[in-house]
Amino acid sequence: MKVLVIGSGGREHALVWKLAQSHLVKKIYAAPGNAGTAAIAQNLDIQANDIQSLARVAREQTIDLTVVGPEAPLASGIVDHFQSQGLLIFGPSRAASEIEWSKVFARDLMLKYGIPCARGEVFTSLSQAASYVKNQKPPMVVKADGLAAGKGVIIAHSVEEALAALSSILEKKAFGVAGGRVIVDQFLMGKEASLLAFSDGKTVVPMVPACDYKRVFDGDRGPNTGGMGGYSPPEFVDQQFVSQIKRTVLEPVVRAMEKEGRPYKGVLYAGLMLTDEGPTVLEFNARFGDPETQVILPRLKSDLADVLFSVVCGTLDKQKVDWDNGACVGVVMASGGYPGDYRNGSPINGLDSLPPEILVFHAGTKRGSDGRIYTAGGRVLAVVGQGKTIAQARQKVYASLPRISFEGCHYRKDIAERAVRS
């Protein structure tokens, strides 16, 4: 097959890297890709939201399967457009992906079908939202309804912080149209985990679980980011838990979407909090997570192209999906200032000095005319260590990180630390 992967981040590099190992795949294109994908695929100078151009090149290059990485093209209906052109594409339709691009839709769906979620209220009016939070006991969680690059969820530890978050979203339009509505949710106590699953609209096959780190600084301090690292498997998640989530969350959601006339094909990502009352859904994503993908796909033993094709063709029930028993720890190296303002164009040093067992997935990178690789984004690299245990994988990745450098580089020092301590 010839495969097109849409997107330019670390998730897309991981997808290209895994697809390149498939016996079914003879050529991979990445649009627009990055310096990492360019080493194993042909990058195309087409942005991920340029749906018309992407469909045109898929026809011209006789692409057999297109794989959508980021959420924005899904929300814009790329799957619907490709399908109308007779092109095979992996991902949910615009209607199905609303489970991510509208937190209000996802919340209403869960309430309607009895899927466990946090209690809260939806607001479009700043004054009504402010009156509500003044009568709540902090902490509480303020969420922008739409897509906000992973930064639209604010944990407010006081009423004043909640009011500031509401003003930022509803009044100052910090997230643009994504902040037309807000949800004010109860704050859930417990351990957080992510469980992604393949779905062909009928069959649901969970992947291995993972944990990611949203806050920019050690100790879960500072503002939310797109993700500063992650690990798999979480030490507190066993197969019994995975089976429980499949039974109480993933399968009910897929059945609910079918009843709503929105059959769900692609990856369904459940962000979960393990509370004393049981697992509760924090959010759904309609695609592979980032940076979870970078610590999940190295553990996949099955042929990824085979799996993706079975989802598109509706034959997932006949597809075996195997995983190894090892562990992965991934750490994101970010530009100075991220998730705020940052500068691009700094040369990246040391990429050729790493041991072979260390994986480096590029995110915000580009190759210059001089052949060197430069920073071109907030999250620059995801460096992944592999081992038989989390402790081994963590030791390997943190031993390798000092070999890589670029101006302003920063990363968290505590990824998977709690897993090793426990």
Image (tube, rainbow, N blue to C red):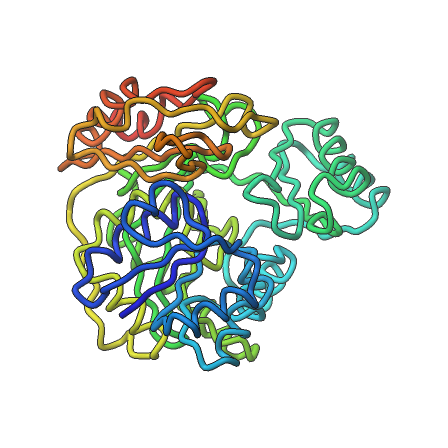
Quadrant, the N terminus: bottom left
Which x, y percent locates residue 177?
73, 51
Q: Nearer the viewer, residue 10 or 102?
A: 10
Q: Residue at x 76, y 51 (%)?
A: 123
Seen in the picture, residue 36 relative to 66 is either above or below; the reply is above
The reply to whether residue 135 is in sight is: no
Give the farthest residue toward the right.
Answer: 127
Which x, y percent locates residue 140?
63, 37
Q: Nearer the viewer, residue 245 or 302?
A: 302
Report the side of 48 relative to 311 (left or right).
right
Q: Nearer the viewer, residue 278 or 378?
A: 378
Report the side of 36 relative to 258 (left or right).
left
Report the side of 289 relative to 155 (left or right).
left
The reply to whether residue 293 is in sight is: yes
Q: Residue at x 23, y 65 (%)?
A: 25
Q: Residue at x 39, y 58 (%)?
A: 5
Quadrant, the C terminus: top left
Which x, y percent locates residue 201?
41, 75
Which x, y percent locates residue 417?
31, 25
**Quarter holding residue 152:** top right
